[in-house]
Amino acid sequence: MTTNDAGVKALEPYWMPFTANRAFKQRPRMISAAQGMHYTTPAGRQIIDATSGLYCVNAGHGQPAVVAAITEAAGRLDYSPSFQFAHPQAFELAGRLTALAPGDLDHVFFASSGSEAIDTAMKLALSYHRARGEGQRTRFIGRERGYHGVGFGGISVGGIPANRKMYGAALGGIDHLATTYDRARQAFSTGEPEWGCELADELNRILALHDPSNIAAVVIEPVAGSTGCIPPPKGYLERIREITAAHGILLILDEVITAFGRLGHTFAADRYGIVPDLVTFAKGVSNGAVPLSGVLVRKGIYDAHMVGPEHLPELFHGYTYSAHPLAVAAALATLDLHRDLGLNDRAVALEAPFAELLMSLRNEPGVLDIRPVGLMCGIDLAAKGGAFGKRGYEAMERAYHDHDLYVRIAGDTMVIAPPLVATGDDLAEIRDKLAVTIRASA
Ligand SMILES: Cc1ncc(COP(=O)(O)O)c(C=O)c1O
């Protein structure tokens, strides 16, 4: 579909997020329906979804139980105030999530987006330290190439230059660890690369500079997702956990992409055998059907806040849509599906064949690296004519228009993260469609 002038005008009012608006409006990539592994275009073409929407539809599209739960909730309780009142399903969901969470993360604060979850986690880290008489702990440490959404907290600890450069100083008092990615040492690794654990020791250098007693928290993703899927080197996260724990620094693990099966566990923390202090989640928790996010916290963090007059809120923070009834209904139904379909085990079983299929693309033109881990994978393509992102854009466009494939790009990297319900045939189809797309965009 290309648009004539009148068509472009009709598309003009919508300022699309993280989108090349002018290019899109000249040649739109519309989606009008979805079911299972597929999107449907307005013209009726079926397009296979290789990135679970934006890494959120882990249980596949249009799951009848999720649809029914949302419909029922909408008819029964469209909205319930989240401040000073609550609805019973919010407590049910909190109980189920905390039962699934690692270690003693036994309380959960709800929000709607990953960005809100990160802001909440950062505020909780500050208020926790202050409540304990360590209010000088105000500094945060993020990581280069990290993505933590688009709030001022998230872009400050995040490490994607384009997301930061237009927005002034954002939050002060932030340092960044180096990215763990080094193509020369890690290219074409399957799973967690062997090299790079020692990069965690850089944290000690930053701590020495500021003194550990001034640091509130380290904020990192287990696998850096949005930047193009960078798995952690073997032992890296464990080392970060050791160093933070040794200095009373909180570890905020941003599991907005990695939770709910993407790495074969409900939380990636379990894959790496670590217990963070706070875990942010979103996306897959409600299968993307209604926005829901949250922060799981260790018992001590909740307890430290439960002071002061009992008639006043202990924490002056929250959202109109925290634990929205429709979102909670979607999440409860999604958790049932995860259990009933055994999606974690499925991801574990698919991990090796998925990696093998994608690695078979390594000799396609201009493929610089392939990084599969769990059921996600980054494929770096050589830039075209020195123009950053042009090849990636063309690959995404051709995939949609010519090869019936939806794939997310980050610059010149394609990120594959199919629904966990994918069959072997679905994965083979995605692989073959990627191959033709890569060739066509070379
Ligand atoms: C790790 C991580 N954190 C936070 C976010 C922000 O989530 P949202 O877009 O819902 O604000 C994302 C989104 O992709 C993410 O991948």
Image: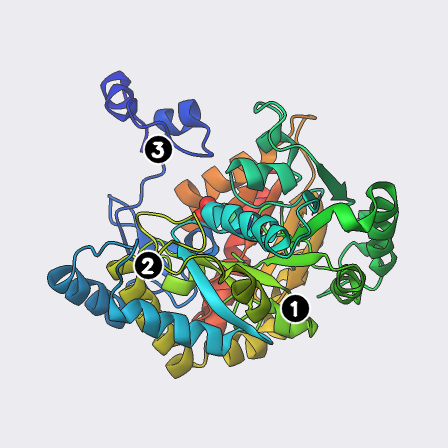
Q: Residues within 10 Å of mark 1 (few under 14, many from 20)?
A: few
Closer to the N terminus: mark 3 or mark 1?
3
Does residue 97 appear in the picture of this structure? yes
Closer to the camera, 416 or 175?
175
Q: Quadrant of residue 164?
A: top right
Q: Residue at x 64, y 53 (%)?
A: 129
Q: Tell whether circle 2 marks a residue whose Cβ is less than 8 angstroms from ligand 1.
A: no
* C-alpha separation, residue under disc 2 versus residue under disc 3: 34 Å
Query: How many numbered dots are placed on residues in this image?
Result: 3
Dot 1: element: helix
- Residue 323's label in the rendered image is 2
Dot 2: element: loop
Q: Residue at x 47, y 70 (%)?
A: 425
Q: Residues within 10 Å of mark 2 (few under 14, many from 20)?
A: many
The amino acid marked with disc number 3 is Pro
- Residue 53's label in the rendered image is none
Labelled pair 2, 3 in contact (Cβ < 8 Å): no
Closer to the camera, 214 or 255?
214
Residue assigned mark 1: 356
The amino acid marked with disc number 1 is Glu
* C-alpha separation, residue under disc 1 versus residue under disc 2: 40 Å
Q: x, y percentage for residue 163?
A: 58, 32
The amino acid marked with disc number 2 is Ala
Q: x, y percentage for residue 83?
A: 30, 53
Dot 3: element: loop
Q: Residue furthest top?
A: 5
- Residue 28's label in the rendered image is 3
Closer to the camera, 97 or 299?
299
Q: Is residue 331 left or right of residue 73?
A: right
Q: Residue at x 24, y 66 (%)?
A: 87
Q: Residues within 10 Å of mark 3 (few under 14, many from 20)?
A: some
